[in-house]
Image (tube, rainbow, N blue to C red):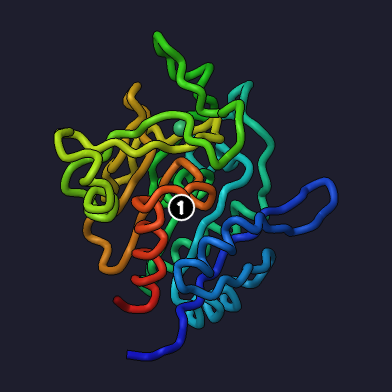
Amino acid sequence: MSNKKPVIALTPYFNIDQDEPYMRPAYLKAIRAAGGIPVILPLDLAESDLAQLVDTVDGILFTGGPDVHPFYFGEETQIHCGNVCLRRDRMELALLKLAMDEKKPIFGICRGVQLLNIGLGGDIYQDIPSQFHEEFPIAHTQPFAYDIPAHKVSVVQGTLLDRLTHLQATASNTSEAVFMLNVNSMHHQAVRRLAPGLIASAYALNQLIEAIEKPDYPTFFLGVQWHPEYLWENDPAIKQVWEAFVGAAKGE
Ligand SMILES: [Mn+2]
C-alpha cells in the first residue's frame, strides 16, 4: 500500500456579499488529524474540469453552509427559507454525481447531508421550527459554543455509523440497547423524505433524521446533520468517523 496520504477535497464556503470563497479551519484540522491532506475546491469550473479534479482526489467532503435552493427539490420557497448560494448548489450537485461515478468516499456535514439527499432525489424541511411540530422543541440552533453537544441522537443498529461509533463507546454504553451520540446542532433545515437508496442511521429524539448513508455504496457514504469537526477532539466515537472516512479515501 502506498505511503501517500489521501487527499480530501472540500466544497468551499462562500461569502455572497463579498464574492469571496472561504473555509472554516476546523474542517481542515479534522482532516489533517485523521491523516488526510485537505484541499479546498474552486467554484465555477466547467464540468469537465471538475471531473478532472475529482479524478485526482481521494475523497470528497461536502461542508456546511447556506440553504439549498428549493427548486432543486421541487418546492416553492417557504417563508422561513434562508439565503442560498446558487454557485455552490450547481457545483456541489455536479460534484456529487461525478464523485459517485468514481465511487469516491463521500462525507456530508450539515448542509452537506441535505445536499446528498437532495442530489439523490430526496427533500428537506426548509425550516424545522415552522414545519416540524413537537411538544418539546429541541434546540437545533444551539445557544452555546460548537464544541459543546446540544442534543442526543440515537444510532440505528447495524449501520455504518453504528459500526464506527458503537465500539468506541461500549465502555460507557454496555447496558444501552440503543446507542446514543451527543452532538452539536447548528441547522434550521433537515432531511425529510429520504432519497431512494438512502437510509437514516441516526435520529434526534423527536425522530428528526440526523444522519444518512447509502448501504450499497462500495466505499464510504455518510452524511451527518451535526458538526463533527468541532467534536472529535473530545469524543473518540466521532474521531473514529473522521478516521474511517480518511481511511476509506486511502483505500482501507
Ligand atoms: Mn440537530
Dividing the picture into quadrants, the one containing residue 10 is: bottom right
Q: Check the picture and name the quadrant holding the C terminus.
A: bottom left
Q: Ligand 1 closer than 8 Å to the CB at disc 1?
A: no
Residue labelled with disc 1: 232
What residue do we see at 39% from left, 73% from top?
A: 249
Question: Which quadrant of the structure image shows residue 28?
Answer: bottom right
Residue depicted at x 46% and y 73%? 35
Judged left or right of residue 151, residue 111 is right
Q: With respect to residue 215, does 195 lie above or below?
A: above
Along the line of sight, the residue nearer the viewer: 33 or 207:
33
Vertical position of residue 242 compared to residue 7: above or below = above
Q: Residue at 45%, 87% (x, y): give it.
A: 4
Callout 1 amino acid = Trp
Residue extending farthest right:
18
Which residue reaches farthest front?
171
Q: Quadrant of residue 217?
A: bottom left
Give the residue drawn at x 37%, y 31%. 152
Residue 34 location in percent, x, y? 45, 67
* Quadrant of the frame with the N terminus: bottom left
SS at badge 1? loop
Q: Is residue 250 left or right of residue 143?
A: left
The percent position of residue 146, horizontal first and vertical second, equals 58, 40
Q: Residues within 10 Å of mark 1 (few under 14, many from 20)?
A: some
Q: Position of residue 82 (x, y in %)?
A: 65, 32
Residue 168 rendering spot, x and y as whole percentages:
27, 52
- Image-based side of 249 in relation to 157, left or right: right
| Depth check, front residue: 8 or 90 | 8
Q: Is 18 above or below relative to 59? A: above
Q: Residue placed farthest to the top in the image? A: 135
Q: Closest to the observer: 147 or 78? A: 147
